[in-house]
Amino acid sequence: MRIIHVGDFILEKDEKSAVNEVLDSGRLSEGKKVREFELALAEFIGTKYAIAVSSGTSALIAGLTALLYSQNSPVKPGTNVITAPVTYISTSSAIVKTGLNPVFVDIDRRYFGITPESIKEHLETVDDVERYSLILPVHLMGYPCDMDGINKIAKKYGMQTFEDSAQAHGTIYKGRKTGSLSLLADFSFYIAHNIQAGELGAITTDSYDIIRLVKKIKANGRMCDCPICTRAETGCPKIKSYEGDDDFDPRFTHDMIGYNFKTMEFQAALGLSQLKKADWITRRRQENVRYLNENLEKYSDMLQLPEYLDTVSYLAYPIVINKPEKIPRKKLRTSLEKMGVETRPLFGCIPTQQPAYGYLKNEYEGRLPNAEYIGLNAFYIGCHQYLDQGDLDYMIQAFNTIMKDLR
Ligand SMILES: Cc1ncc(COP(=O)(O)O)c(C=O)c1O
């Protein structure tokens, strides 16, 4: 029996030699490869800066902490952050862990993101609008949120925007890549993401203030904050400019309380080799989505298939069950898994379906109908770049067999 994983990572010659190069260099902690990766990522996304951190979760925490420290930001402890109820849990958990308050609005049932309409409707009905400081939309499964609309609302209410682009590597929205459409954005390069490196994350931004703060926060608040370290080549400008104490070392002097969110050279080397193939990865996934759509279209009365757009960099192949009373998700997922087609639920509605957020259940139950529906009735299968024609035909055959029995 074939096994069709939701994602895969085939370590080819270039990935292996990238890792060996790190081993040969003798430098494992952050160095040249991390810098190279940051420059390449910034160029790929189209921002002035990118900074690597240990994971997408640490990118979210570091980014939110930077906003809390930034003098120009309305983001203050305890203020409200409008965000997505259907996403990987860390988007919301990072908000809670940084002392901010997540406020969930409903999503679009086809593209899974929060919408300008649902944000606007929420802000127009609350009586504490001055407590809202940030909108943190998630580009789920690669589909971009309507950032023009979201930025417009943020501006009207004096809020900032922070995109979670962890699942959208290379998606294009109105000619620009996601991750470059707000003040800052986070990325995850966790295994099975389009650009993957095992465990790795990043922040992208055009703001020098944000990149400087994230750089400090990820390294325990140390006083190093130059975007590019010149210590080895020309000496440290901070030491040179510091008067009165010959013993000052910015690496071991801390003017903020931060974290250790640094990464390693291995992950950056893998990330770099993946970035070089980004266009191929995006194209292969798009071709696979298109082929699956063409062949599963006959079930579209029962199953909402992912809309095909040639600007989307697909994380996976999401399916929403239209008639769960006829085709329960559990039954369909179990049947697919039995035939070797791996599936994953589309995350669950955080405030009403995730046990960790049980304290919000009463407040939100029934208020997020699309998110609750998706949380119960949507799932995804793989569309990754390593699937071949035989795999795709096998997946279609699996659906044909299962749907014949279920219909
Ligand atoms: C939308 C979203 N945000 C954040 C994260 C967190 O990334 P990581 O797993 O690298 O911590 C993920 C991970 O899959 C994600 O999908």
Image (cartoon, helix red, strand yellow):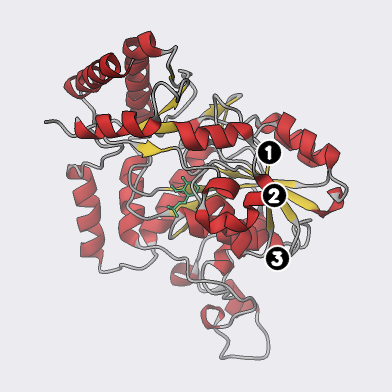
Neighbor class of circle 1 (other Cα within 10 Å; few <14, some 14-19, many 20+) is some
Determine the secondary structure under disc 3.
helix
Q: Residue furthest right?
A: 127
Q: Distance from label 1 to label 3 (Cα)?
A: 33 Å
Residue sitting nearer the eye, 334 or 60 = 334
Amino acid of disc 2: Glu
Residue under label 2: 363
Q: Residue at x 24, y 55 (%)?
A: 19
Residue under label 1: 367
Q: Residue at x 50, y 38 (%)?
A: 375
Q: Residue at x 23, y 47 (%)?
A: 15
Determine the secondary structure under disc 2.
helix
Residue sitting nearer the eye, 370 or 111 = 370
Q: Distance from label 2 to label 1 (Cα)?
A: 8 Å
Asked whether residue 185 is in view, the answer is no
Mark closest to the chain's N terminus, 2 or 3: 3
Residue under label 3: 69
Residue 405 percent location from the top left of the image: 26, 17
Q: Distance from label 2 to label 3 (Cα)?
A: 30 Å
Asked whether residue 340 is in view, the answer is yes
